[in-house]
Image: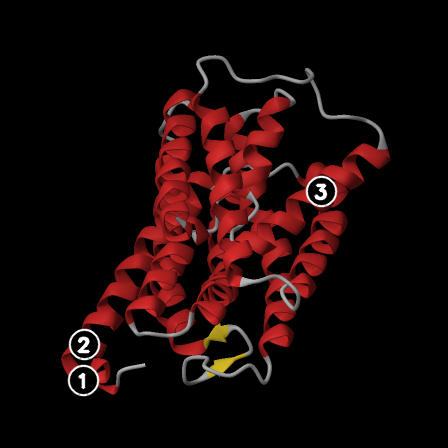
Amino acid sequence: MGTTLYTAPVLISLAVGLLCTGAVAGVLAGLLGVGGGIVIVPVLFWLLEYLEFPGSVAMHMAVGTSLATIIPTSISSARLHHSRGAIDTDLLKQWAPFVALGAALGGWSALYISSQALTAVFAVIAFLVAVNMLLPKQIVLAKQLPRSQLANTGIGSVIGFFSSLMGIGGGTLSVPTLAMFSFPVHRAVGTASAFGFVIALPAVLGFINAGLGVDDRPPWSIGYVSIPAAVLLFSASVFTAPIGGKIAHRLDAKKLRWAFALFLMLSALKMASTIW
């Protein structure tokens, strides 16, 4: 890690870049219910590579720090959606325990998953979800959510598990999943914003635990969470998330779906390029 990179102009540029990233992530959190991680994870990963941190910690730091920023951002976004009646509280109560369980397992798994594997998980899942959202006709499995408790347990746990490994809020997986069961897209986005908190809290604790004592992490980190980066990111995103929420309620379902897919596709391709 080159100490010449830590000059005042470079540090100021990085701080401004993180604030801008947080602002964009906040808008996306409110607009798409994705918690902003779809922007934060790639940006943090590339910043850590630029600062010459080893690849063995870069992706873990990006994911863990992204999860930390999702906590306050998702609260801000969920409050906006709740004020507009866009959160399905019955679904939230039904899925939340299993989403949280899956997220906790994902955070615990960070002890055993390599940085390259985390990158692959992010790229592959984001790409598949984007392709599904871009299809001319959405894949519909049923006209309503399954009534089986076992099915709901499985769906919630899988969403929580993979969302925590990707460092994202619940929207990336829960919105398209709900769409497959003919769930209204605006209520799906609103409910997903609440799932972001349910995912991020247990998952970030797992990434903190997994990173304790690991060498070559950035200064002022707790486990796999960079405190300075997290503060800069969510200090901007927490204020811009309501803006995204207001925009979401002005767009029709088709435009909202295409916007969601576009950001997923771009992020997936960029992350996949780092593996190749």
Other-residue count near label 2 (Cα within 10 Å), few / some / many at <14 / 14–19 / ≥20:
few
Q: Is residue 3 above or below residue 115?
A: below
Q: Quadrant of residue 45?
A: bottom left
The residue lying toward the viewer, choosing from 227 and 223, is 223
Left-right relation of 260 to 60: left
**Residue 267: x, y in percent?**
38, 44
Which is in the foreground here, disc 1 or disc 3?
A: 1
| Amino acid at dot 3 | Gly
Q: Residue furthest front?
A: 276
Q: Residue furthest top?
A: 137
Q: What distance separates the C-alpha of mark 2 from that of mark 1?
A: 5 Å
Q: At numbered mark 3, what does the secondary structure look like: helix, strand or loop?
A: helix
Q: At numbered mark 2, what does the secondary structure look like: helix, strand or loop?
A: helix
Other-residue count near label 1 (Cα within 10 Å), few / some / many at <14 / 14–19 / ≥20:
few
Q: Residue at x 53, y 46 (%)?
A: 193
Left-right relation of 144 to 245: right
**Residue 202: x, y in percent?**
66, 63
Other-residue count near label 3 (Cα within 10 Å), few / some / many at <14 / 14–19 / ≥20:
many
The reply to whether residue 100 is visible in this rendering is: yes
Report the residue marked by disc 1: 7
Which is in the foreground here, disc 3 or disc 2?
A: 2
Q: Quadrant of residue 18?
A: bottom left
Report the residue marked by disc 2: 10
Q: Residue at x 55, y 81 (%)?
A: 214
Q: At numbered mark 1, what does the secondary structure look like: helix, strand or loop?
A: loop
Q: Is residue 244 above or below residue 237?
A: above
| Amino acid at dot 1 | Thr
**Residue 63: x, y in percent?**
50, 61
**Residue 170: x, y in percent?**
57, 46
Labels 2 & 1 near each other (Cβ < 8 A) = yes
Check residue 156 in the rendering and tell me which mark sits there, or answer none.
3
* Among numbered discs 3 and 2, the one appearing first in the sequence: 2
